[in-house]
Amino acid sequence: MGNDMYSVEQVAELLGLHVRTVRGYIRGGRLRAVRIGKQYRIARADLDALTGRPAPAAGAPAAEVSSIVQVDGVDRAAADRLATLVLAGVNTHHDPARPLRVQTVHDEERHRMKIVILGDAAATADLLHLVDAVLAGDNGLLTGKETGHA
C-alpha cells in the first residue's frame, strides 16, 4: 500500500486539520504533493514523512516502542551529563533502519529527570541497557565524582 494517494480533504480528515491548513503545508513545502489538474494528491510516503511515521518495510510488521525513564534525585549538572551520554549513545550507534527519537527533560524543583524514547524495540532495548548500566554502576556520573581506574 505504499502507492496510496490521498486528496487534500482525506489528509485533513486523517490528521484532524482544516483543509486550508493542509493546502498551506503544501504551498509552504512542508508537505509534498502532486498537482493533477486543479487537485493535489499526496502520496502515502509523503504523508508519513510529514507525520514522522517511518514507512513500513514490505511484508514486515512494524512496531514502535514508547518508553519513559524517570530518574529521581538528579540535579541539573547530573541531568546534563546523563542527557549527553544518552544522546551520544543514540548518535554513535545510529542505524538508519532502526531510528530512535530521544528527548530529555529535567525538573529542578523535584530533582527529577525524564528520558523519553521512541523507536524500534531492539534499538530502544539497547539504549535502556545503556541507561541501566549507567544508573546501576558506581561510575560517579550522577554524583559528579569520577572514579579513576588504573
Image: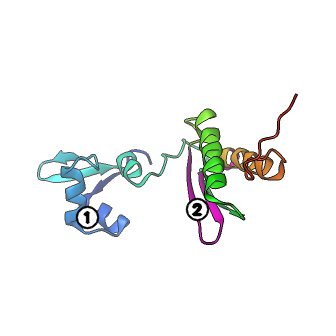
The answer to whether 98 is drawn above or below residue 109 in the figure is above
User: As shown in the figure, which amino acid type bears the numbered disc 1?
Assistant: Glu
Where residue 117 sits in the image (x, y, percent)? Answer: 61, 54
User: Disc number at residue 139?
Assistant: none
Judge by depth and name the residue closer to the eye, 54 or 110: 110
Which residue shows up at 22% across the image and 66% down it? 19
Furthest toward the top, the residue is 150
Where residue 124 sits in the image (x, y, percent)? Answer: 67, 49
Dominant SS in magenta: strand
Q: Is residue 127 left or right of residue 147?
A: left
Q: In the image, is residue 34 part of the stretch drawn in magenta?
A: no
Q: Which of marks 1 and 2 is nearer the N terminus?
A: 1
Mark 1 Cα shell of 10 Å, populated few (<14), some (14-19), many (≥20)? some
Q: Which of marks 1 and 2 is in front?
A: 2
Q: Mark 1 = which residue?
A: 9
Judge by depth and name the residue closer to the eye, 39 or 117: 117
Judge by depth and name the residue closer to the eye, 54 or 143: 143
Q: Mark 2 = which residue?
A: 106
The residue range painted magenta reads 100-122
Q: In this view, does 133 lie to the left or right of 109?
A: right
Q: Is residue 12 left or right of residue 145?
A: left
Which residue shows up at 63% across the image and 53% down it? 77
Callout 1 touching callout 2 (CB < 8 Å):
no
**Residues at marks 1 and 2, CA–CA distance in whole angstroms:** 40 Å
Q: In this view, does 119 lie to the left or right of 140?
A: left
Which residue shows up at 67% across the image and 44% down it? 123
User: As shown in the figure, which amino acid type bears the numbered disc 2?
Assistant: His
Furthest toward the right, the residue is 150
Q: In the image, is residue 112 part of the stretch drawn in magenta?
A: yes
Q: Quadrant of residue 66?
A: bottom right
Mark 2 Cα shell of 10 Å, populated few (<14), some (14-19), many (≥20)? many
